[in-house]
Image (cartoon, rainbow, N blue to C red):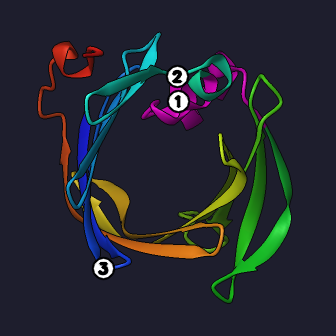
Amino acid sequence: DRTTVMRGVVQGVNIMIVSYQKVPNKLKQEIRAGEVDQKVYFDGEAGAQMIGGSKTEIDSAELEKLKIESTIILYLELDHYGVKTNIVGVELVNKKPAYKIEMTLPSGTKWTQFYDKDTFLKVKEIKAINTPQGSFTHEILYSDYKVIEGLKYAFKITQKIGGQSMDFNVSSIKINSGLSDREFEIE
């Protein structure tokens, strides 16, 4: 299991994101933005989102993405999840060459990831987000990698959605802390 705590400020509002993940594919994410609390749950089969006291079930298209995003060891199990990959080429990310890899989910949804050509660390990711307000491109930049229990994790994450950029700093990562399956039960 893994617990990640990130903090940032967006338009003057303090934001804290706590992500809990457990093998094989369980996820709970708590987002606190000022006075607003949002939780996303995925128990391995079903998903739900809670905003305030209102609960919404996550539909099949978004559920597929959530199932794959919740998998800690996705890259070791691409075939199991039906994810196809294709190396598209090399592009510059922050003025450094990076391998551009297109991932295609079973539904046909495409994600693009970029890995530094020298370090092989993920430096960028592009996904489409579909909301009731429309579709948006979600770009995530990863940097400031640090070693936690023998693994490298990005400690600076910049998310760009539409014209808005949000910088987050990881304040802690805990590995194998013994998270209970109850942590992921949908409330």
- Does residue 125 lie above or below 30 as drawn? below
> How many numbered marks are there?
3
Label 3: few (<14), some (14–19) or many (≥20) C-alpha neighbours in 10 Å: few
Q: Nearer the viewer, mark 3 or mark 2?
A: 3
Residue at the spot x=70%, y=55% of the render?
A: 136
Q: Amino acid at mark 2?
A: Ile
Q: Amino acid at mark 3?
A: Gly
The residue wearing badge 1 is 66
State the SS at label 3. Answer: loop
Could you classify mark 1 by the number of other residues whose Cα lies within 10 Å: few (under 14), some (14-19), or many (20 or more)? many
C-beta proximity under 8 Å, tags 3 and 2? no
Q: Which residues are magenta?
A: 64-84
> What residue type is disc 1 on?
Leu
Q: Vertical placement of 168 versus 111: above or below? A: below
| Left or right, residue 10 beside residue 106 | left
- Nearest the eye: 73 or 130: 130
Q: Main secondary structure of the magenta part?
A: helix
Label 3 sits on residue: 12
